Amino acid sequence: MAEYINPDYVAEPEKMNVKKGLEGVVMDTSSVSKVNAETNSLVYRGYPVQDLAENCSFEEVAYLMYNSELPNKAQLAEFSAKEKSLRDISKDNLNVIKALPKKCHPMDSIRTGVSFLGCEDERIWDATPATNLDKAIRLLAKIPTMVAADYRFKKGLDFIAPNPNLSIAENFFHMCFGKVPDAKVVKAFDVSLVLYAEHSFNASTFTARVVTSTQSDIYSATVAGIGALKGPLHGGANEMVMHMMIEIADAEKAEQWMLDALANKRKVMGFGHRVYKSGDSRVPTMKKYAQVMADVTGEQKWMKMYSSLEKVMVDKKKIYPNLDFPAGPAYYMMGFEIDFFTPIFVMARTTGWSAHIMEQTANNRIIRPLSEYIGAPQRSVKPISER
């Protein structure tokens, strides 16, 4: 059925300035992160993300997200010990994940797993700072276990329990593949988690804050964030990038493929950003580690393809890659199935979501924007006999 739009509607911009997609709208204040469009930079709690990626582990950055400061050695040891102690998930949760249709997207699996985790927590309505912090660490610890369990189950393999002696990055490889790869691979993965951890009021974070603003619980807000992140215009873009590269197949054909795509006005994933206009500040670091993966695996064709596609897009359109563009091939070279790229994103972004959920809770006002109505004018209801 076609949407009715009032033909007599006349916009009154002096009364209502509609911002489609909330573009340019400042909705609230935040101390979690800042995306600076003028300098194409991103900071977490004041620290440049590229410096954090090179010098800090993902565990340190998670602590920073939750506590506003980087940890000292003692604080990190205590935080890591708690995270490691919480990695196990219940047999019931495992069975729920295992029972899901094998063809369902892994984002649906992790969404269901987190929802079940919330059902198991008797403190569901306790949103005090200490309890929410504990729940945030639980999500950080248990989401990788759920993702890895789903990875194994979809392949018809047995579940591998988490190893409390490994870092978050090492443990995830262990749970997926039964072994920890070369330290260079682990570092590349850890860097990707840091880069994906937080990005201001993006679609999924804003979604999580909207849900939190109703005084719902942290699990519901996280589930909502997962639902938003699933979309190919948000988190799912890293999957689309790799599908595109596999379609191209030959690095020598990449330039012409991009020229044809632009000529045909085809949507090319992994380029452009609502905020950054001349380059995503996270890209150089992730591109560096994607190249590390190419050097480790010998799969140089993906980076050759990367360079050709990037050059054409920048030369022709002045549109630059975003983080998803190097992350896609990096994850592929690590051995992960393409449809698990976005759940890996969830593993990282749960830190940013939790930080925003706690920030919203601390100074809450329900988020309730307005819309400008353009439908039929008010009218009378006629009896069915007269319609």
Image: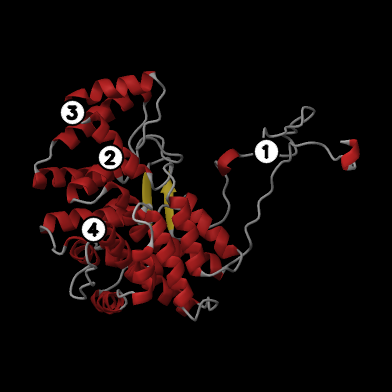
Q: Where does label 1 land, which residue?
A: 17
Q: Earlier in the sequence, mark 1 or mark 4?
A: 1
Could you tell me how far apart the alpha carbons at marks 4 and 2 are, in whole angstroms? 20 Å
Is residue 252 or residue 292 the one in the foreground?
252
The residue mark sitting in front, 1 or 2, is 2
Relative to 321, is 159 on the left or the right? left
Q: Position of residue 94 (x, y in %)?
A: 34, 70
- Which one is earlier in the sequence, the residue at label 3 or at label 2? 2
Label 2 SS: helix
357, above or below 258, in the image: below
User: Would you name the residue on which mark 2 appears?
Assistant: 242
- Left/right placement of residue 249 relative to residue 366 reads left
Q: Which mark is residue 374?
A: none
> What kind of residue is marked 3?
Asp
Would you name the residue on which mark 3 appears? 250
On the rendered image, what quadrant is the N terminus found in? top right
Q: Single out the mark in the foreground, 4 or 3.
A: 3
Badge 4 amino acid: Asp
Q: Residues within 10 Å of mark 4 (few under 14, many from 20)?
A: many
Q: Amino acid at mark 2?
A: Met
> Residue 285: image x %, image y %?
24, 46
- The spot of residue 95 in percent (x, y) is 35, 70
